[in-house]
Amino acid sequence: MLCLLFGIGFESRGLFASEWSAGPFAHEFSLTLGAGTRTEWLGPIYYHEAAEEQITWAVPPFFSRLVNPGVDTEEYDILYPLVTYDRFGAEYNWQLFQLLSFSGGQTQDEQKSDKFTVFPFYFQRRSADPAQNYTALLPFWGTLKDRLLRDEIRVRLFPVYSRTEKKDVVTQNFLFPFLHLRQGNQLDGWQFWPLMGHEHREPFATTNYLGLEQLVPGHDKLFIAWPFFFNNHTAVGTTNPVHQQALLPLYSHHRSPQRDSSTYLWPFFTYTDDRERKYQEWGVPWPLVAFARGEGKHMNRVWPFYSHATNSILTSDFVLWPVYKYNRAQAAPLDRERTRWLIFLYSQTVERNTATGQAKTRTDLWPFFTRQQELDGRERFQVLALLEPLVPGNKSIERNWSPVWSVFRHERNPRTGAESRSLLWNLWREDASPTNSHASFFFGIAKRDRDGDGVKWRWFDWSRPATGEAPPAAK
């Protein structure tokens, strides 16, 4: 009775998998771009997809789950990006809008470790190795290890006192950021910001993780009344020591064996002689108006009206920025071009393999459509793309949000000759192969089969073929 009410039909059609056909109410069909099947219920409300390597089921945009048994991975999204969960083997990460997170697994020495974070206030790790444990309640008290780009951070009533370690360098901050003391291997420094600061390091040799000796460059840095005066010597002990000095806004100098640059009445008059990359550049003022000539760079830029810059690998153009923007990178075998109008309004990216001649393209016209073509020629076209052009390649957006507003989909697989089209969440759907095609209209009330013998229409045909009976479109 339910089948008659919703027009649900079940059939087996030659090259196509068994299918439920009831338009937006229920539809099961073979995947066009790969092996597997997909079931969709109630338009965009629910789908289940069993592909060759992974299984996905979702209630967009509220929930989705993806499992790949072959590599032991699992992903959950709840109102993405509000809540996400990712697991790879024993490693896992659970987070609430990047603020509340749980993560853990095994460290490199195969010891179990679990982290809990309420960013930016509470940080915790518990490990089988007590030396790896930490707890921090910011800004009051605590310790963090391997977090926030530091090996260790200790906090005592921050900003009153904090201590950080990064490699061999230890920095003690008092009333951050005003006063700090810094020590390390061959290094001493201090600052009373913004009045004055000085740091000095002698070059020295060390051994890397491969057991090879390498040089750690030295430096000497001084600032007075930051940012108005500084005098820095860096890369000391190398073949390209650098001296930078500035008294802003009067002048700024950069001197090294490979590159010289001077700015007067900063930033109005700039001249750069880059001997390493073989070009000279003038800026008046840089970077708004700039010109470069040489083997390594050729540029004419008058921002925001016009710019053309190129070298042996890169090309960058704009006209009336951000109206038109063009970028190209050529490094064999990759040739990548991207053209944009009004940043995200229109974008086209083409990646070519110059060795094989294959091309991968993506075209977006926000918020109207997105089109993608892979290197092997597989194509996908979608009408209404509200977020996809803004975050291209985001699989969670495609899994959780695209089914909600994709009112039209077209997919084509040139390797198998399979092609499919869907309008209004399968209110009309057509699947085709090189030898036959099948279309379903208005909740399966009307169906059309096309093969070498012609076209056959069926109306209100909700019967299932008997076992062994030849399907309507199969020959």
Image (tube, rainbow, N blue to C red):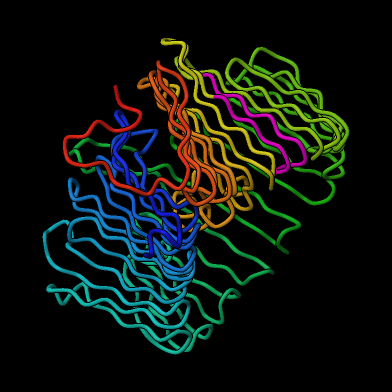
Give left or right: position of 61 versus 11: right
Left or right: where 459 falls relative to 371: left
Residue 108 falls in image quadrant? bottom left
Quarter of the image where one finds residue 17:
top left
Q: Nearer the viewer, residue 218 or 450?
A: 450
Instruction: Pinpoint residue 40: horizontal percent, then vertical percent.
Output: 41, 54
151 sits to left or right of 406: left
Q: Nearer the viewer, residue 248 or 109?
A: 109
Is 8 colored magenta in this rendering? no
Q: Residue at x 47, y 24 (%)?
A: 455
Residue at the (13%, 72%) spot, across then down = 129
Report which quarter residue 279 is drawn in: top right
Q: For the N terminus, which image quadrant? A: bottom left
> Which residue is nearer to you in this view: 111 or 339?
339
Q: Which residue is located at x 73 percent, y 18 percent?
A: 298
**Any magenta on residue 348?**
yes
In-front residue for pair 304/283: 304
Question: What percent of the width, then of the height, locates residue 389?
Answer: 62, 45
What is the number of callouts on the image? Answer: 0
How far across and how far down the image is residue 72, in percent?
19, 52
**Stretch in magenta:** 335-350
| Predominant secondary structure, magenta span | strand
Q: Residue at left 15%, top 77%?
A: 130
Compared to residue 464, the image places residue 24 above or below, namely below
Please provide percent x and percent y for residue 470.
24, 30
